[in-house]
Amino acid sequence: MNDKIKESILCEIKKFDTIIISRHQRPDGDAVGSSLGLAKMLKASFPRKRIFVDNEDYSEYVAFLGSEGEHPTDVDYINALAIVVDTGNMQRISNKRVTLAKKLVKIDHHIDDNPYGDISWVEDERSSTCEMIVDFYMTFHDELVLDKDSATCLYAGMVTDSGRFRFRGTDSNTMLCASELLKRDIDTETLFANLYIDDYDNMIFRAKMAARIKITENGVAWLHVSRALRKRRGLSLEEASNIVSIMDSIKGSLIWIAFIENDDGSTRVRLRSRFVEVQELATHYHGGGHACASGATVYSKEEEAALLCDADKILKKYKSENDGWI
Ligand code: AMP
């Protein structure tokens, strides 16, 4: 079934002279990697077409992968094919103008609770959208060109979204796709340094925050980063948000959550877990995502406390019904 969908996507790509690629807001490695990687692949495969990447925000973290380049005008949209990657729902697309395009294609690996697009290719068991783009290339390898530049972007997205090939969803297909990319002689040493080397001040911040981790009765680890603390340390929202990862290896804390106060009074919630699923919880609090990695937003201290309480109940139930968790 997906082969038919992939064929129809390639067919549309061939039909249109202008293709515009977008991804989700507050982009991560997979969003940036899949949008830039796909754009580079299409440019190399169809040099006569006009391929744009068009988004309204930016990520410092993966800026080393390169810029989006020239942006299209409203007129460019009229006869364009828009491809949105790595974005579960319409509201999260980092580009209001995608609706101006003649046709819209969705390529994504999030749980599909908000279908959109004229053609939708969603595989929520995939470890990343980048993996799907590589799979697309491998399906049509005699018609497409995947160069080292594109491979580097796609590999960055695969590495980050799979937690360095560790998270649920990483399977033999993931490794086949990664292997295809590594044939392009990617400079993985530089790539991993760009992704994971931290500066000294940030390390100290993380160490101080580790001392502030709180654990609920049944083991949910959580941290709150206030706006004041963020300002005092001169941290961007993105830098502060990365704090979620310091809680990922606490024995018995199968769910861990970071609350990061935004500038507008709302609070970004980053939910992570192992064994137990948190996507439904995130959906309940204005969010969504994957089984074990989701995002949400709360609008008051009371809502934050309610979310924590719900997470604690979920973990209590999970522990009472399952053995063998760590
Ligand atoms: P984050 O904690 O923001 O990195 O999000 C974890 C995962 O959940 C990513 O795959 C996001 O794309 C997804 N996600 C985050 N926020 C939302 C939301 N409001 N709605 C749907 N998916 C989300």
Image: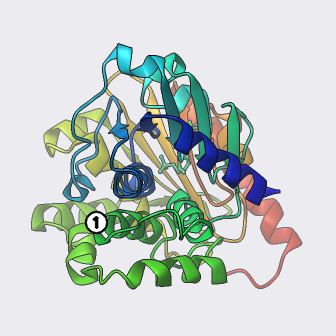
Q: Residue at x 46, y 16 (%)?
A: 78
Please state the total of marks drawn on the protein image.
1
Q: Quadrant of the C terminus?
A: bottom right
Q: Quadrant of the N terminus?
A: bottom right
Q: Position of residue 10 (x, y in %)?
A: 60, 50
Question: Identity of the amino acid at label 1?
Answer: Asp
Q: Residue at x 73, y 43 (%)?
A: 112
Q: Residue at x 77, y 53 (%)?
A: 4
Q: Residue at x 48, y 80 (%)?
A: 180
Q: Is residue 112 visible?
A: yes
Relative vertical location of residue 164 with respect to residue 222 in this rendering, above or below = below
SS category of the residue bearing label 1: helix
Query: Quick check: which quadrant has ligand 1?
Result: top right
For disc 1, the marked residue is 149
Q: Position of residue 61 (x, y in %)?
A: 26, 54
- Looking at the image, which is closer to me, 16 or 272? 16
- Looking at the image, which is closer to me, 245 or 224? 245
Q: Residue 318 occupies which quadrant of the picture?
A: bottom right
Tell me: 229 left or right of 131: left
Q: Position of residue 151 (x, y in %)?
A: 37, 69
- The way the protein has been coloured in the rendering is rainbow
Q: Residue 189 occupies which quadrant of the picture?
A: bottom left
The crowding category of the residue bearing disc 1, from other C-alpha atoms within 10 Å (few below 14, some 14 to 19, many at least 20), is some
Tell me: 68 left or right of 122: left
